[in-house]
């Protein structure tokens, strides 16, 4: 490697060295630090081999930025390497664009759909949890962080964005064009689903969700219901703490969850006086699109034996990230805190296992959903001991 190439590698390696050093400072084990430095030596050898032996001249800066993305990808989907411009936008706390598609994303090789918000352009287009977003406006998402992907989906209301989508085992991707819209706040909706059984649809968790759940549950009780089916399928929207606020309505005593920050003892999130106002038996509907606040809500009820979960394993997204800036102005959006289940078990990247497994049908694009809702029917059966009519 020539002198210029070595200087470039040195300059671009500084963020990686700092990242490793930060990890070393936080780590209590000297052996772990030594292992980190050993990996850095191997990393330098790999860069040298690439620049000296690859068939064409190598853009070292491009290689190093790819390595940074790779480091972040090796952790979890929400940890991301941000370039200088992305860090600047993140630090400004820029509000999301007014026009949105209604998608919530994660990463798995490419960007992947967690959920499509009720009534949104994405939901109307039939996008489903698990769909891969291979490209946005023709640009591959292979190296696109969740933060950047969400930013690219937003824009001015009335404009459009074109997605290249791959579903299931399909060999060919499907092109979907979505209009960006100003999305309204979604409210909790309640109705009588069967004699004596009420149904609450909770499409997102916001500041007023807990109060809306309380109000709708009270109205259903006055209508004569003796049990509740609460639907949080496809609910991946809202701050995680809002899910715990709603869980307090159903759990009168015990631990709702734990917070686990690095190097600290688990912090229990306990119930308080006055919690547990709603005492009706509950079945929760969940699927692969249930994430974040909805998972904390469902986990608190399941873990305290206040509800059984009917449906599919949830997404497993229950963590917080913080920005760690690097010397060149770029940064790492780094997961630093996990939420754990009431029993202390892992939730992030694990998800909740349903008590009664029922699979959602996977529809092809343009295919009409089947008549009826099998999950609601199974939930009513589980609550009443009788098959739904």
Image (tube, rainbow, N blue to C red):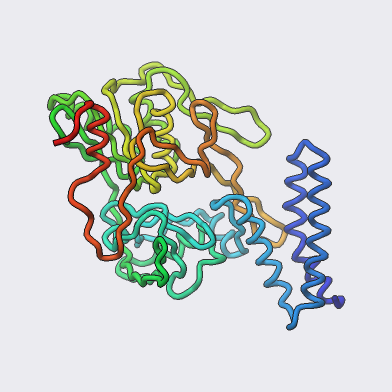
Residue at 28 percent across and 23 percent down: it is 278
Q: Is residue 234 above or below residue 63?
A: above
x, y percent for residue 320: 54, 43
Q: Is residue 310 left or right of residue 381?
A: right
Q: Is residue 128 above or below residue 137?
A: above
Q: Is residue 303 left or right of residue 189?
A: right
- In which quadrant will I find the N terminus? bottom right
x, y percent for residue 75: 62, 50
Q: Is residue 389 above or below residue 270?
A: below
Choose top left, top right, bottom left or bottom right for residue 329: bottom right
Q: Is residue 147 left or right of residue 158?
A: right
Residue at 35 percent across and 35 percent down: it is 356
Residue at 69 percent across and 56 percent down: it is 326
Name of the residue lying farthest toward the bottom? 56
- In which quadrant will I find the C terminus? top left
Q: Can residue 271 be seen at all in this image of the molecule?
A: yes
Q: Work out whether residue 211 or residue 125 is closer to the camera in this orientation and state it.
A: 125
x, y percent for residue 201: 26, 40
Q: Work out whether residue 282 or residue 188 is closer to the camera in this orientation and state it.
A: 282
Q: Is residue 342 above or below residue 88?
A: above
x, y percent for residue 242: 40, 36
């Amino acid at each position: 490697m020539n002198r210029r190439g070595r200087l470039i590698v040195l300059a671009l390696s500084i963020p990686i060295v700092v990242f490793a050093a930060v990890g070393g400072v936080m780590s209590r084990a000297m052996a772990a630090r030594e292992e980190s430095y050993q990996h850095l030596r191997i990393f330098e050898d790999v860069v040298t081999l690439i620049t000296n032996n690859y068939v064409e001249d190598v853009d070292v800066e491009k290689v190093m930025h790819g390595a940074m993305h790779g480091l972040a990808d090796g952790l979890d989907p929400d940890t991301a390497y941000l370039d200088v411009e992305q860090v600047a936008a993140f630090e400004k706390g820029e509000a999301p664009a007014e026009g949105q598609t209604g998608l919530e994303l994660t990463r798995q090789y490419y960007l992947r759909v967690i959920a499509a918000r009720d009534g949104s352009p994405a939901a109307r287009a039939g996008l489903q949890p698990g769909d891969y977003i291979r490209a946005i406006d023709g640009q591959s998402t292979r190296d696109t962080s969740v933060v950047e992907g969400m930013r690219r989906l937003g824009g001015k209301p009335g404009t459009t964005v074109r997605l290249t989508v791959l579903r299931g085992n399909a060999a060919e991707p499907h092109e979907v064009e979505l209009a960006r819209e100003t999305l309204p706040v979604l409210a909790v909706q309640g109705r009588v689903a069967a004699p004596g059984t009420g149904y609450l649809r909770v499409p997102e968790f916001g500041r007023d969700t807990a109060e809306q759940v309380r109000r709708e549950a009270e109205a259903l009780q006055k209508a004569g219901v003796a049990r509740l089916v609460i639907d949080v399928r496809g609910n991946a929207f809202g701050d995680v703490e809002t899910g715990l606020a709603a869980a307090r309505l159903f759990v009168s005593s015990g631990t709702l969850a734990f917070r686990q920050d690095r190097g600290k003892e688990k912090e229990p999130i306990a119930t308080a006086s006055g919690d547990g106002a709603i005492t009706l038996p509950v079945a929760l509907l969940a699927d692969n699109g249930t994430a974040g606040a909805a998972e904390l809500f469902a986990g608190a009820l399941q873990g305290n034996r206040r509800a059984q979960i009917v449906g599919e394993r949830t997404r497993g997204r229950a963590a917080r990230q913080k920005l760690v800036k690097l010397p060149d102005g770029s940064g790492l959006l780094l997961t630093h805190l996990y939420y754990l289940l009431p029993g202390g078990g892992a939730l992030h990247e694990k998800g909740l296992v349903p008590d009664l497994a029922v699979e959602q049908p996977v529809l092809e694009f343009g295919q009409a959903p089947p008549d009826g809702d099998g999950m609601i029917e199974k939930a009513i059966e589980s609550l009443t001991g009788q098959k739904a009519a």
